Image: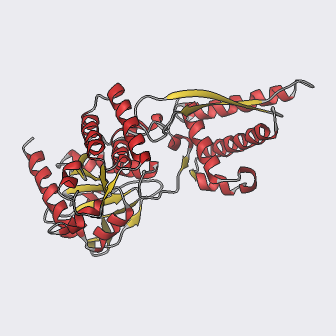
């Protein structure tokens, strides 16, 4: 069965079962069953636990009846999108009946549940997120040819086709955890002024959405690199449990979305910030902060999972860094590097150059 056929078959079978139950008067009990990812931390990677959730009508209480109506409405919206071939956003679905749904997060959760139930990516449901990511560094075509674009743009909800001339100039790709750091580097035109040549910079503004991850994966897989060397992909994240976790999601995906593994970028190289970048600043830099109780709890939980499940090289790097920040009881933000000689740009230039030289000799 095609990936399009799976959700259509599930939705139509569900609706037929509902109609069949309605006809069983007076004891019919229409229901909708979904599979759901469960776990302590939805951002963690690796193995997942699932459970079935069932909503029936009229249900045990008013809330169950309401949830049955919400899921039924979302299934109908997805069914229409698949039949018409039109892609809708989760925000579109919410605003078609905001009084029913109450909040956007409910739509987001059920769309992901439906995708997981059908064992397809959310994109195969013809549903996308309104992307929050930003990027800068691609060439924009104009009548006079291709010119550098100095301002950043939002990551597109969907990518029809990236032209070769938009990518062929790239020497490197840098994924940045924080929007503030991204904007600071854009203001200094680092994407064009780096001593390592032009590059692409992008940010998911913290934990990345699927559109941002898909944009990065699409660039990595572009046909341009069939006949020229693909630029190295680097990551810049805070030296804290969340920063390390975000880097893992780019590389290995999220536990809450195990059916989206095709978006993983395991080839990403971690530039920093790392414990070694913190050590020299521990005594006198206000940017170096103590771990909070939440940080320590998260770091210990991440280590436990990595010790049980890890096999990838990136996991070994994560374990080492988590152990170091726990022992040192410190964390540091990327902005720490601004106060070093040459600032963040100088540090990035040096690190990128070093990694590019290594890649040439591989």
Q: Is residue 217 left or right of residue 234?
A: right
Q: Nearer the viewer, residue 129 or 145?
A: 129
Residue 180 % position (x, y):
37, 66
Identified at 29% across, 35% down, the residue is 315
Task: State the residue at coordinates (30%, 41%).
Answer: 322
* 115 relative to 56 in the view: left or right: left
Residue with the most extreme left position: 361
How far across and down, in percent of the image, does residue 178 sit?
Answer: 37, 60
Considering depth in this image, is 165 or 183 the residue closer to the camera?
183
Residue 251 seen in the current view = yes
Q: How many marks?
A: 0
- Residue 86 x %, y %: 58, 50
Q: Position of residue 297 (x, y in %)?
A: 42, 40
* Picture quarter with the C terminus: top left
Is 306 or 210 nearer to us in this picture?
306
Which of the colour schemes (rainbow, by chain, secondary structure, one colour) is used? Answer: secondary structure
Closest to the observer, 285 or 156:
285
- Asked which quadrant contains residue 111, the reply is top right
Residue 29 falls left or right of residue 116: right
- Among the 4 quarters of the image, the one containing residue 143: bottom left
Quadrant assignment, res 183: bottom left
Residue 189 lies, with reference to residue 69, above or below; the image says: below
Of all residues, the one furthest to the front in this rendering is 283
The residue drawn where x is 59% and y is 34% is 7
Residue 169, compared with residue 214, is above or below; it is: below
In the rendered view, tell whether residue 342 sits above or below residue 263: below
């Amino acid at each position: 069965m095609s990936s399009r056929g799976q959700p259509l078959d599930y939705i139509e079978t569900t609706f037929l079962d509902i109609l069949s139950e309605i006809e069983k008067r007076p004891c019919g009990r229409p229901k909708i069953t979904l599979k759901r990812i469960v776990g302590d931390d939805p951002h963690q990677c690796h193995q997942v636990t699932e459970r079935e959730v069932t909503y029936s009508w009229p249900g045990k209480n008013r809330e169950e009846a309401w949830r049955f109506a919400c899921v039924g409405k979302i299934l109908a919206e997805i069914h229409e999108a698949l039949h018409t071939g039109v892609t809708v956003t989760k925000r579109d679905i919410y605003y078609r009946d905001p009084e029913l749904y109450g909040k956007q997060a409910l739509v987001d959760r059920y769309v992901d549940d439906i995708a997981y139930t059908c064992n397809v990516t959310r994109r195969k449901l013809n549903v996308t997120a309104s992307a929050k990511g930003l990027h800068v560094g691609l060439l924009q075509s104009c009548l006079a040819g291709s010119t550098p674009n100095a301002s950043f743009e939002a990551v597109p909800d969907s990518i029809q086709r990236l032209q070769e001339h938009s990518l062929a100039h790239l020497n490197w790709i840098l994924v940045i955890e924080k929007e503030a750091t991204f904007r600071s580097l854009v203001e200094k035109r680092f994407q064009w002024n780096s001593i390592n040549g032009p590059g692409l910079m992008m940010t998911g503004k913290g934990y990345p959405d699927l559109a941002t991850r898909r944009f990065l994966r699409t660039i990595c897989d572009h046909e341009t690199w069939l006949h020229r060397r693909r630029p190295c992909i680097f990551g810049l994240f805070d030296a804290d449990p969340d920063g390390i976790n975000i880097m893992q999601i780019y590389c290995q995906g999220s536990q809450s979305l195990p059916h989206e593994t095709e978006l993983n970028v395991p080839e990403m190289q971690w530039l920093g910030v790392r414990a070694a970048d913190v050590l020299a600043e521990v005594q006198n830099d206000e940017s170096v902060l103590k771990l909070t109780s939440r940080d320590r709890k998260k770091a210990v939980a991440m280590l436990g999972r990595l010790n049980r499940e890890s096999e990838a090289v990136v996991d070994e790097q994560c374990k080492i860094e988590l152990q170091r920040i726990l022992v040192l009881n410190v964390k540091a933000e990327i902005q720490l590097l601004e106060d070093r000689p040459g600032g963040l740009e100088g540090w990035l230039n040096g690190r990128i150059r070093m990694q590019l030289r290594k890649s040439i000799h591989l």
